[in-house]
Image (cartoon, rainbow, N blue to C red):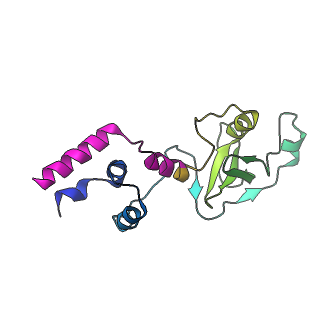
Amino acid sequence: MTRLARVDMDSVAPLLPGDKVAGRVAAKGEHFEWAPTLAGKVHSSDPLMTRAPTAQELGQPAFIDLKGIKIGRLTVIGIAAEVVSSNGQNWVVRCVCGAYETRKARYIKACVAGDNPGATEPMCDWCHQTRRLQMGRCNPKKAAAATEAIMEACR
């Protein structure tokens, strides 16, 4: 095992050229497992179970049916059936990339109102991570450590 095996792709990706050939070469690198950063959030390539609003929910004046709303790259599919939390209702959204995720109702309502909680267009976490790497945004400490490891390996 070489010293370069310790370097993760998230640190090295901003240092690599971003053309088509480099993308094909880099795609044959090591596999890594990605997971959403927030606890209680679900990210899946398979459709998530949804349910219809209950009569009790429909009777509440504060309840708004968000099904079918499009915000950025996300489309609201329905209420998450299997994901339960104590701090707000989870809704299943589908990104244009085909991934399914859960989002809180307050996030969706804020995006519809124009008060986007994030600085970017609403999208799934995987698309957000990919966009960050394409734009060259990364953790500077990891990038510096990766650069140092590459320089050390070249000696």
| Residue in the image at 63% along x and 61% along y | 98
Extreme residue toward the top, this view: 115
145 sits left or right of 76 in the view: left
Q: Is residue 46 left or right of residue 155?
A: right
Q: Main secondary structure of the magenta part?
A: helix
In the rendering, at what x and y percent does residue 89 appear?
A: 71, 42
Quarter containing the N terminus: bottom left
Is residue 36 something one can see in this rendering?
no
Is residue 149 a member of the stretch shown in magenta? yes
Badge count: 0
Q: Where residue 90 appears, x then y in whole percent?
A: 68, 46
- Near-viewer residue (14 or 45): 14
Out of 94 and 127, give the one closest to the viewer: 127
Quarter occupied by residue 85: top right
**104 displayed left or right of 5:** right
- Please give the name of the residue rendered at 75% of the width and 38% of the height, measured from the top-left corner: 112
Q: Does the magenta run of residues contain 41?
A: no
Residue 148, horizontal then vertical, whole percent: 19, 45
Instruction: Look at the image and tell me whether residue 49 can be seen.
Output: yes
User: From the viewer's perspective, is residue 120 above or below residue 48?
Assistant: above
Residue 119, image x, y percentages: 58, 35
Q: Nearer the viewer, residue 41 or 146?
A: 146
Q: Residue at x 24, y 59 (%)?
A: 5
Compared to residue 109, the image places residue 51 above or below, namely: below
Residue under the point 14% across and 55% down: 154
Q: Magenta stretch?
A: 128-155
